[in-house]
Image (tube, rainbow, N blue to C red):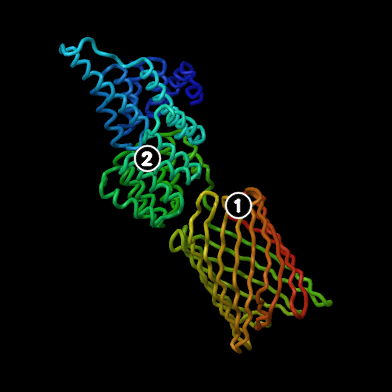
Amino acid sequence: MTARKEQRFKDAVAVLERAAALEPDNADMQVQLGFSRSALGDNAGARAAFTRALEIAPGYQDARFGLAQIDFRNGDLQQARERVDIVLKAQPGNAEAMALLASIKRAEEATARAAARVSGKIGRPTLASPKASKQGKQLEALLSRAREQRIDGHFKEAEALYRKALALSPGNAEILVALGLVAGFQQDFTAAESYFLETLRRRPGDLDARLGMVRLAIWRGETARARKLIDPILAEYPDNGEVLALSARIALAAGDNRQAEAQFQTIVAHDRSNTEALVGLGDARRAGGNESGAREAYRQALLLQPNSADVRQRLAATTPRKWRLDVGSEVSDLSGGRTSWTDNAVSLSYRLSPQTTVAGRLRLATRWGRTDTQFEARLDQALTPDLSVYGLLAATPDADFLAEFSVGGGASWRAIGRRNDWGPLFLNVDVRYDLYPESKVTTVSPGLQYFLLGERLGISARWVHSQDDAGVSVDGYVLRGDIVATDRLRFFAGYGNAPEISEGAPVEARTIFTGLSLDLKEDVTLNASYAHEERAAFDRDTFGLGLSLRF
């Protein structure tokens, strides 16, 4: 809530009390009310709000943490420790709870020393210095504010607060891990790794830092490495909710949506206040095509964290479109006064699942006053998040210049994931066999594509080899660059010195091409292109225009 973030706690309490009266069973409202009352020194009112939140949601650890803070301030160290131990068992990476536990331990040690002095060995007990006490409160306040900013998705603000906290407590492992997480959320993976490794250098075997390295592997798209890191941790902590959630997240990244959904569902069944598991459950359902189930999980997560930008973004995402219609037309002007060529096509595709798409295409082409009609069917299948394949069949009844029959296929493999603004790298291959009335042509085309600048620039290179059944072969290459100018506008350009198939024979051709794609609306894209081609027989200028509709 805005008033609470601005530390206008009286205003916050007034607003929250009215809201709580309207929604008496809203646990998050009670927690917000508890923290606001606590900030005003109303420990009794805060305790009542936190207690009510736990009655509504017994697994709500923020409410239990609030009660632990009140117990600590009231001097009930045993009760405070019991509560914070429960919080840390459920949330091992909770930096605020770790800081409170450290304060409890210091207070317990001071109490023990005081008891020894009272026994007569030493005179009056020495209390903690006002400076140390003030510093501890400042650290606790910084961590609390940083956690709020992190939960709300304000990662830069959270990072600044954590840095201030680290200055007060240099080398604090919990703060280092928290800094690693907020750096990772901002895709600064190099910084995140340095924080996690520094923590492990100081505290070898630290669970939170080890889990941070697992998260880092997931963020980088290194699914196999993430699984290798999580398996030994899972063996050590088989009942830890955070470890189980990460294992499920890795299963999701590996494309095993069913296993991921089952694991997230198991976590939620034991702790319905586990927001991370609820979000993961939504992601697994969305990946499996269950959009209504995904949104239900996201809505439950939003009730627990109403200010979470991450959850709101998922809910704001449009329902994935299953149908796509592409309509395109090309006109080619040939040198030497030759008759123009035309090439018109319409294709319709349907996404059977997030991994499988089927499509049909109708092509109408004219050459030298003759017209061919070609029918094509295609299947695209993602085998894993990193590997996809496709296959196609095409036929042209009564063909004059197109292939009577064609069969083709290919694959694309993400060999290297994205790291900060660099990558990913894809390796691709396409193979096609064309049967013409008087010849047969085989074309093989391997290539690679690399992205940089946060995937706003893509560079690709492809080698092309075509050979007919008479042994005539032509080799060449195609270079291309793609630029994302804005969220709606993309450009491409390239050069090719590669074979073209002309009425069943591979011929050499040099081509310069360019084009753009403009999203007119969220589900409507305009495509335009131009190419200049030089062959031994003639030159050719091709102008293309198309429209893509998703529904």
For residue 373, above or below residue 459:
below
Residue type, label 2: Thr
Q: Nearer the viewer, residue 291 or 489?
A: 489
Question: Residue at the spot x=56%, y=76% of the render?
Answer: 444
Q: Which residue is mark 1?
A: 456
Q: Residue furthest right?
A: 337
Q: Which residue is mark 2?
A: 199
Image spot of residue 412 (x, y percent): 51, 65
Q: Quadrant of the C terminus?
A: bottom right
Q: Nearer the viewer, residue 468 or 92?
A: 92
Q: Nearer the viewer, residue 545 or 197?
A: 197
Element at badge 1?
loop
Quote the CA–CA distance across marks 1 and 2.
Answer: 34 Å
Residue type, label 1: Arg
Question: Residue at the spot x=43%, y=51% of the render?
Answer: 290
Q: Nearer the viewer, residue 502 or 456?
A: 456
